[in-house]
Amino acid sequence: MKVGVLTGGGDCPGLNAVIRAIVRKGVQEYGYEFTGFRDGWRGPLEGDTVRLDIPAVRGILPRGGTILGSSRTNPLQQEHGIRRIKENLAKLDVEALVVIGGEDTLGVATRLADEYGVPCVGVPKTIDNDLSATDYTFGFDTAVGIATEAIDRLHTTAESHMRVLVVEVMGRHAGWIALHSGLAGGANVILVPEQRFDVEQVCAWVTSRFRASYAPIVVVAEGAMPRDGDMVLKDESLDSYGHVRLSGVGEWLAKQIEKRTGKEARTTVLGHVQRGGTPSAFDRWLATRFGLHAIDCVRDGDFGKMVALRGTDIVRVPIADATVRLKTVDPRLYEEVGVFFG
Amino acid sequence: MKVGVLTGGGDCPGLNAVIRAIVRKGVQEYGYEFTGFRDGWRGPLEGDTVRLDIPAVRGILPRGGTILGSSRTNPLQQEHGIRRIKENLAKLDVEALVVIGGEDTLGVATRLADEYGVPCVGVPKTIDNDLSATDYTFGFDTAVGIATEAIDRLHTTAESHMRVLVVEVMGRHAGWIALHSGLAGGANVILVPEQRFDVEQVCAWVTSRFRASYAPIVVVAEGAMPRDGDMVLKDESLDSYGHVRLSGVGEWLAKQIEKRTGKEARTTVLGHVQRGGTPSAFDRWLATRFGLHAIDCVRDGDFGKMVALRGTDIVRVPIADATVRLKTVDPRLYEEVGVFFG
Amino acid sequence: MKVGVLTGGGDCPGLNAVIRAIVRKGVQEYGYEFTGFRDGWRGPLEGDTVRLDIPAVRGILPRGGTILGSSRTNPLQQEHGIRRIKENLAKLDVEALVVIGGEDTLGVATRLADEYGVPCVGVPKTIDNDLSATDYTFGFDTAVGIATEAIDRLHTTAESHMRVLVVEVMGRHAGWIALHSGLAGGANVILVPEQRFDVEQVCAWVTSRFRASYAPIVVVAEGAMPRDGDMVLKDESLDSYGHVRLSGVGEWLAKQIEKRTGKEARTTVLGHVQRGGTPSAFDRWLATRFGLHAIDCVRDGDFGKMVALRGTDIVRVPIADATVRLKTVDPRLYEEVGVFFG
Amino acid sequence: MKVGVLTGGGDCPGLNAVIRAIVRKGVQEYGYEFTGFRDGWRGPLEGDTVRLDIPAVRGILPRGGTILGSSRTNPLQQEHGIRRIKENLAKLDVEALVVIGGEDTLGVATRLADEYGVPCVGVPKTIDNDLSATDYTFGFDTAVGIATEAIDRLHTTAESHMRVLVVEVMGRHAGWIALHSGLAGGANVILVPEQRFDVEQVCAWVTSRFRASYAPIVVVAEGAMPRDGDMVLKDESLDSYGHVRLSGVGEWLAKQIEKRTGKEARTTVLGHVQRGGTPSAFDRWLATRFGLHAIDCVRDGDFGKMVALRGTDIVRVPIADATVRLKTVDPRLYEEVGVFFG
């Protein structure tokens, strides 16, 4: 049996660990052959393949990125996209597909499986940890670790100059990275996309922190927005997902804080550093187990399913479940963490 | 209301994060006062206390160790131990106790609560992750991260000299650190206390790895034992918990591998480095949430309970549940990981 | 004898190591007392002091920032600034001053020493490594290490998406951080303030890298400028020194590359993360030795001098020598490194 | 022209950076071809070669170890060893040899050059930093960084339990790693092979540290020896260079401290972890510059020379100079650092 593998969407530490686990177990235990597709859906769409056997996956476990490459190509937006994929899979004798990706990439897999009968198994991937149906996604722990280390470093420079430091982290629609790294880094304010923030409240926290003779760190998710809509659109730039954004909330907020509190404020935008490099041990463990269970789904003929983490177990859920609802920060959790603000 | 806090047993990254969360929430939200007890149960036994207020917990989140100190003092083995504790708590007006510790420390808390009516709340702590009733304990992720980084480093020295490298990690009764760091580090053999190992099988894996032109890494938990009881007791030394051990399995195994395969083998014993230093972001998150929920137990008068992680939720379980059964590595999980051996 | 200590200018990993060494040796070996001045020259100007004895310097070696605080206050720009400093020193019985700082801070020390006879010893500090008369300054190695780790991480995200990644690092007038981190991180283009760059040449290197099937990393110092003056001033922002800058060269360059090569390009501005946090072992060593030798200068009555590194030796040079000429990147060194471009 | 390259002796972070620089500059600027020899002198002795061109050196800069492999094979101890090397070089048309190694490896190069007219250029390599004629060798900074990070971690575990922690680091004949990491890590005692130590003095420092309510860290080089020769030989084991040693000084010292002070003491032997893994930015910079200058020696026909660091310059010295005298720790430097003991 020949199995295809592809990775789609933004890169994420742990992708190579998934690929390695799939191939090691598939070849050694089930005698499968593998075809790697290059650059997400572009691979099967254009029949662009990579050799994928045990030598090809040696040494890739600690490496960030993906040996298969990635892209945001969406075959649903291409003429006869799905048909071309079916034809290419047939030509290459690929009988099943393991699709590693986020909402968009898995959405295509659902269509392929449901409407065209292509046997797909999904592996969830989002650095933002915002996919339902799984406790965590790989890459998230690495990103949180990098952001926390940066916040640790920024504390000393804030204290030395008694300045406010605003740290902008990833998170367009969900504030998980901000919440975890902000808590772990001892931030004094954490702002998430799930709740519009009140600039006055932020300034009150900042001021109270200075009164205790400490310099405040404000962690803000890229997608966080002020409550009153008074955000001035400043400049077109690209966020760390590679999409156009209208303004950087971090820089905007630093200016507001300076204006309203009279204290110096500086911004650091962590950007792509959060998604590159070697995965944390946690992410290597999670990604490897996802890979091992994904190839078991193939062996069991259990298609249309996605692997997911529940507690310490890997379970199988319908792919569609992953994308049905964005997993955002629970207001009660945000409130719980609020005891450290100010 | 005055609440006592103590940390017992071996130190563990994250202890300070727990203490800080308890004090921040207790003071700010519930208006409690706190008394820190020094060096585990020795503190209440001898009435040895430390100031514990908001200034005392500033800046401790990223610091390893425990500001309260720790010890293995067991009041149950002291004459009138429990009575002296009761008297000292009364003298100090301490009405409730938050006990942060492992099996032994929490065992005393259970006795105090059950037999003498001292209101206790437990926070589980074991670097080995071997407490039932919680998915993970804090400190474990940090230890796994340190061990994984060491294994990453050892790969290159193994390859350059085509030697076997045996890495001995913590884990007297449970192989969690070996399993997670071995998998994350791409080890070729992982040996855990839960399953006696066969030296011949280990040598077969080692030899097969060399045949593929790679140098093998063998990760072995301190408590792992060979199947056939042919382990030669060599020398008294102290393991990384501070207990006497009869022999280092790592060095013994390296000699066996040299003798049986003819390949050079070296041992690295990671030791105390695994339990010191700044906690990982994951452990800071977990430890902080444990602290926040422990003080909520006090507020709710929900004594005799211990906080625990289930999935992404913090729940409350009877303290006794934690210690009733050691959480060891499930044989199926060990088998799952075995696909990477050899 | 009572000795004053102050730290001026931007913060820099290693400042605390200098302070600790001065105090440890001064108290233990020479029986001195110390007065810490708060926030650079603001301290002696306003008579604002901090206790500075052995307990005060315990545990500060691995901590970034400065326990004395820092500022850019310049007494030469204040009415009777120097006279007020003299009066305050006299009032506090401070007989000598150890001044830790960069060009501006040391410039004041020179004036104080030369014109007003205040006995000063200097310790050079600049994260940019651009002070003459010393091989290296502390803080630089830490900054290079942080930038290199970031570049390592960005390689994988560049490769996965076949994008150009532009990394903007510190360096307004000198390109040392760009040169060292760019070389160590395996960058494909390195741009420094010392040599105006040709955008077309940069694009040629970028294109040649893609032809070899690799994604390019471009490291650019904050102060680098294009050759032909076609840089479009875009937006006022603050650079990582806290000064206003007219435009971010990193973002500007990424846009130029996209326009001219048709390849996707992203920018990461490392910012303040480069100057915070725990110093590297090299910087702790260098800073400590600077401190030990600075207090020896005081003991020897060798004022008006600054400590400096020459090879592996610490030597004494006139303070004025440090500031007479900016140490910029030698064109031959830049050319040597150019073999890795493209 | 065809140039041979080999790496001999123990591995060392930065070896791959040297190889990459030699090949990049040799091919691109001088049009040379390269032959890699496998496993040190074993390669030319047996004619065992590896392809060495630009694709072969891609991506190796951040990787520890050596892509050429290493060994301690000494052709001077083999029958007709040198003659066989000459014949193999001739057969392969190799006209010059770049030899990267320590005392032993470079010693062979000297003989080859002097007595048999084989044109050799040397690149010094020793993780211990004990080669004369160069300020630093690559790999040393990485080893010091790893040891310092371990000491940082051990402080917290020492403090929590008020125990002595003895850390044994590399350094058979020279105490550079102990001195630098001990100073950078804030150790309270540092013991080096250059000066026999007095156990009573060590215990006095340990006791004085406890009196100040801190737990002491003792850093001891593998090769350090007690003054009075009362060291009990305990057990044969292998040190981190792979040589047999008669006893571990770290464990021996911990036992002595326990016996004489009554305080608990634990030992950590850092071992091979110190020499593996990714090189620090400093070592990548140094190793790369060594490689660039070594190939310039070949181009200039400047044989019998070795590259060396002097301040910030790379210079050329006779290979024989490197090995004529071991560079040990200057007693005055050791005394300078002694202010931090106790």
Image (cartoon, coloured by chain):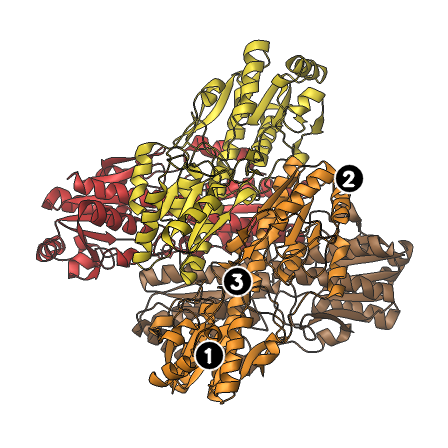
Chain colours: A orange, B brown, C yellow, D red
C81 shown above or below B225: above
Where is the N terminus of chain C found, in terms of image quarters? top right
Residue D171 left/right relative to D323 = right
Q: Which residue is mark 3?
A: A280
A76 shown above or below A147: below
**Callout 2: SS:** helix
Distance, label 1 to label 2, CA atoms, is 55 Å
**Chain of the residue under label 3:** A
Amino acid bearing label 1: Val
Residue B212 left/right relative to B85 = left
Q: Which residue is mark 1?
A: A98
B178 shown above or below B146: below
Check residue A211 in the rendering and tell me which mark sits there, or answer none.
Answer: 2
Which of discs 1 and 3 lies nearer the camera? The answer is 1
**Chain of the residue under label 1:** A
Where is residue A258 drawn, in percent x and y? 69, 39
Answer with the quarter of the image where residue D306 lies.
top left
Taking the image as drawn, is residue B184 in sight?
yes
Amino acid bearing label 3: Ser
